[in-house]
Image (tube, rainbow, N blue to C red):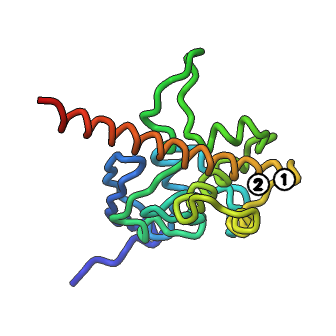
Protein backbone atom coordinates (compact mmCIF):
# COMPACT_ATOMS: atom_id res chain seq x y z
CA UNK A 1 0.00 0.00 0.00
CA UNK A 2 1.44 3.41 -0.97
CA UNK A 3 1.02 6.46 1.18
CA UNK A 4 -1.35 9.14 -0.02
CA UNK A 5 0.23 12.46 -0.98
CA UNK A 6 -0.05 15.25 1.58
CA UNK A 7 -3.42 17.06 1.47
CA UNK A 8 -1.77 20.36 0.51
CA UNK A 9 -0.42 18.86 -2.72
CA UNK A 10 3.20 19.44 -1.68
CA UNK A 11 4.48 16.17 -3.11
CA UNK A 12 7.89 16.72 -4.71
CA UNK A 13 9.48 14.95 -7.64
CA UNK A 14 13.20 14.70 -8.35
CA UNK A 15 14.40 16.32 -11.57
CA UNK A 16 17.79 16.91 -13.14
CA UNK A 17 18.42 19.97 -15.28
CA UNK A 18 21.61 21.15 -16.93
CA UNK A 19 21.25 24.92 -16.75
CA UNK A 20 23.87 27.04 -18.50
CA UNK A 21 26.19 24.05 -18.45
CA UNK A 22 25.77 23.27 -14.73
CA UNK A 23 23.95 20.18 -13.50
CA UNK A 24 21.22 20.75 -10.91
CA UNK A 25 19.44 17.96 -9.04
CA UNK A 26 16.24 19.41 -7.61
CA UNK A 27 13.00 18.30 -6.03
CA UNK A 28 10.00 20.23 -7.27
CA UNK A 29 6.26 20.16 -6.91
CA UNK A 30 4.71 18.74 -10.09
CA UNK A 31 2.72 21.93 -10.72
CA UNK A 32 5.72 24.30 -10.68
CA UNK A 33 6.64 26.04 -13.89
CA UNK A 34 10.18 26.08 -15.26
CA UNK A 35 10.35 29.88 -15.03
CA UNK A 36 9.66 29.73 -11.29
CA UNK A 37 12.32 27.08 -10.70
CA UNK A 38 14.87 29.11 -12.67
CA UNK A 39 14.08 32.34 -10.85
CA UNK A 40 13.31 31.14 -7.33
CA UNK A 41 15.38 27.98 -6.88
CA UNK A 42 18.38 28.78 -9.08
CA UNK A 43 18.32 32.60 -8.70
CA UNK A 44 18.50 33.14 -12.47
CA UNK A 45 16.37 36.26 -12.55
CA UNK A 46 17.26 37.37 -16.08
CA UNK A 47 14.34 35.22 -17.22
CA UNK A 48 11.34 37.46 -16.59
CA UNK A 49 7.71 36.78 -15.72
CA UNK A 50 5.63 39.24 -17.67
CA UNK A 51 2.23 37.72 -18.23
CA UNK A 52 2.18 34.10 -16.99
CA UNK A 53 0.00 33.25 -20.01
CA UNK A 54 2.57 32.73 -22.80
CA UNK A 55 1.67 36.01 -24.45
CA UNK A 56 4.69 38.27 -23.88
CA UNK A 57 7.82 36.13 -24.37
CA UNK A 58 9.74 37.71 -21.48
CA UNK A 59 10.30 34.21 -20.05
CA UNK A 60 11.88 32.76 -23.23
CA UNK A 61 14.74 30.33 -22.62
CA UNK A 62 16.30 27.56 -24.71
CA UNK A 63 15.30 24.01 -23.91
CA UNK A 64 17.69 21.63 -25.66
CA UNK A 65 18.58 24.42 -28.07
CA UNK A 66 15.08 25.60 -29.00
CA UNK A 67 13.32 28.70 -27.73
CA UNK A 68 10.41 28.00 -25.38
CA UNK A 69 8.31 30.16 -23.11
CA UNK A 70 9.26 28.85 -19.69
CA UNK A 71 5.98 29.99 -18.13
CA UNK A 72 4.26 27.23 -20.12
CA UNK A 73 6.72 24.41 -19.38
CA UNK A 74 6.35 22.45 -16.18
CA UNK A 75 9.71 21.96 -14.50
CA UNK A 76 9.11 18.19 -14.49
CA UNK A 77 8.72 18.33 -18.29
CA UNK A 78 12.25 19.75 -18.51
CA UNK A 79 13.71 16.85 -16.52
CA UNK A 80 16.86 15.60 -18.27
CA UNK A 81 17.03 18.55 -20.65
CA UNK A 82 19.60 21.29 -21.14
CA UNK A 83 18.32 24.78 -20.37
CA UNK A 84 20.05 27.98 -21.40
CA UNK A 85 19.01 31.29 -19.90
CA UNK A 86 20.17 34.79 -20.74
CA UNK A 87 22.79 34.44 -17.99
CA UNK A 88 24.42 31.62 -19.95
CA UNK A 89 24.51 33.34 -23.33
CA UNK A 90 27.79 35.21 -22.81
CA UNK A 91 29.34 32.79 -20.33
CA UNK A 92 33.07 32.42 -20.88
CA UNK A 93 33.44 35.44 -23.16
CA UNK A 94 36.39 37.72 -22.43
CA UNK A 95 35.85 40.90 -20.45
CA UNK A 96 36.10 44.23 -22.21
CA UNK A 97 38.73 46.96 -21.74
CA UNK A 98 36.65 48.80 -19.11
CA UNK A 99 36.19 45.53 -17.18
CA UNK A 100 32.65 45.12 -18.44
CA UNK A 101 31.53 41.53 -18.94
CA UNK A 102 31.94 40.20 -22.45
CA UNK A 103 28.75 40.18 -24.46
CA UNK A 104 27.55 37.71 -27.05
CA UNK A 105 27.42 39.37 -30.50
CA UNK A 106 23.60 39.37 -30.36
CA UNK A 107 23.61 41.12 -26.99
CA UNK A 108 26.18 43.64 -28.22
CA UNK A 109 24.02 44.34 -31.29
CA UNK A 110 21.02 45.11 -29.07
CA UNK A 111 23.14 47.68 -27.22
CA UNK A 112 24.71 49.16 -30.36
CA UNK A 113 21.47 49.38 -32.35
CA UNK A 114 19.25 50.57 -29.47
CA UNK A 115 17.16 47.39 -29.42
CA UNK A 116 16.17 47.99 -25.83
CA UNK A 117 14.80 50.73 -23.66
CA UNK A 118 13.60 49.60 -20.25
CA UNK A 119 15.22 46.17 -20.80
CA UNK A 120 12.43 44.02 -19.35
CA UNK A 121 11.69 42.21 -22.62
CA UNK A 122 15.32 42.12 -23.78
CA UNK A 123 16.34 38.72 -22.37
CA UNK A 124 13.38 37.04 -24.08
CA UNK A 125 14.03 38.94 -27.32
CA UNK A 126 17.70 37.91 -27.32
CA UNK A 127 16.82 34.27 -26.66
CA UNK A 128 14.25 34.28 -29.49
CA UNK A 129 16.79 35.98 -31.78
CA UNK A 130 19.47 33.41 -30.99
CA UNK A 131 17.04 30.60 -31.75
CA UNK A 132 16.29 32.22 -35.12
CA UNK A 133 19.98 32.79 -35.92
CA UNK A 134 20.74 29.14 -35.16
CA UNK A 135 18.08 28.05 -37.68
CA UNK A 136 18.59 30.86 -40.22
CA UNK A 137 22.06 32.47 -39.99
CA UNK A 138 21.13 35.28 -42.40
CA UNK A 139 17.50 36.01 -41.52
CA UNK A 140 15.30 38.30 -43.58
CA UNK A 141 13.27 41.05 -41.96
CA UNK A 142 10.13 38.92 -42.40
CA UNK A 143 11.82 35.94 -40.70
CA UNK A 144 12.89 38.17 -37.82
CA UNK A 145 9.42 39.61 -37.37
CA UNK A 146 7.92 36.11 -37.45
CA UNK A 147 10.47 34.85 -34.90
CA UNK A 148 9.67 37.62 -32.40
CA UNK A 149 5.93 37.80 -33.00
CA UNK A 150 5.35 36.18 -29.60
CA UNK A 151 7.62 38.62 -27.77
CA UNK A 152 6.07 41.90 -26.71
CA UNK A 153 7.90 45.16 -26.13
CA UNK A 154 5.97 48.03 -24.61
CA UNK A 155 8.72 50.63 -25.16
CA UNK A 156 10.01 50.41 -28.72
CA UNK A 157 8.46 50.36 -32.16
CA UNK A 158 10.26 47.06 -32.93
CA UNK A 159 12.27 48.56 -35.81
CA UNK A 160 15.36 48.91 -33.63
CA UNK A 161 14.85 45.35 -32.36
CA UNK A 162 14.69 44.04 -35.94
CA UNK A 163 17.83 46.03 -36.83
CA UNK A 164 19.57 44.66 -33.73
CA UNK A 165 18.74 41.08 -34.68
CA UNK A 166 19.97 41.58 -38.25
CA UNK A 167 23.21 43.10 -36.96
CA UNK A 168 23.60 40.41 -34.30
CA UNK A 169 23.12 37.62 -36.84
CA UNK A 170 25.71 39.27 -39.12
CA UNK A 171 28.16 39.56 -36.22
CA UNK A 172 27.58 35.90 -35.34
CA UNK A 173 28.33 34.90 -38.95
CA UNK A 174 31.50 37.00 -38.93
CA UNK A 175 32.60 35.51 -35.60
CA UNK A 176 31.99 31.96 -36.89
CA UNK A 177 33.95 32.69 -40.09
CA UNK A 178 36.86 34.10 -38.08
CA UNK A 179 36.88 31.03 -35.83
CA UNK A 180 36.88 28.72 -38.88
CA UNK A 181 39.74 30.69 -40.45
CA UNK A 182 41.71 30.59 -37.21
CA UNK A 183 41.14 26.84 -36.85
CA UNK A 184 42.19 26.32 -40.47
CA UNK A 185 45.36 28.36 -39.98
CA UNK A 186 46.22 26.43 -36.81
CA UNK A 187 45.65 23.15 -38.58
CA UNK A 188 47.78 24.26 -41.53
CA UNK A 189 50.68 25.32 -39.34
CA UNK A 190 50.52 22.08 -37.33
CA UNK A 191 50.63 19.91 -40.44
CA UNK A 192 53.30 21.72 -42.43
CA UNK A 193 56.95 22.46 -42.07
CA UNK A 194 59.67 19.84 -42.00
Q: Is residue 158 visible from the viewing direction of this image?
A: yes
Judged from this view, the residue extending furthest toward the top is 98
Residue at coordinates 57% horizontally, 55% vertically from top-left? 130
Q: Secondary structure at mark 1?
A: helix
Residue at coordinates 63% horizontally, 56% vertically from top-left? 129
- Is 184 drawn above or below residue 94 in the view shown? below
The answer to whether 173 appears left or right of 18 in the picture is: right
Q: Secondary structure at mark 2?
A: helix
Quarter placement of the C terminus: top left
Indicate which disc residue 124 carries: none
Circle 1: is it few (<14), some (14-19), or many (20+) Cα within 10 Å?
Answer: some
Quarter placement of the N terminus: bottom left
Q: Which residue is mark 2?
A: 162
Disc tally is 2
- Is 110 drawn above or below residue 30 in the view shown? above
Q: Which residue is mark 1?
A: 159
Q: Position of residue 110 (x, y in %)?
A: 70, 42
Amino acid sequence: MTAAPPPDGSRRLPIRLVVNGQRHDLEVEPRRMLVDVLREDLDLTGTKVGCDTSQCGACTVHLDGRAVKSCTVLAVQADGFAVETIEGVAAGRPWGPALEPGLHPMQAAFVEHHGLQCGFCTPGMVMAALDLAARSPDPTEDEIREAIHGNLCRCTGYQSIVASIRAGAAAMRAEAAAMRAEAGAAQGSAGGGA
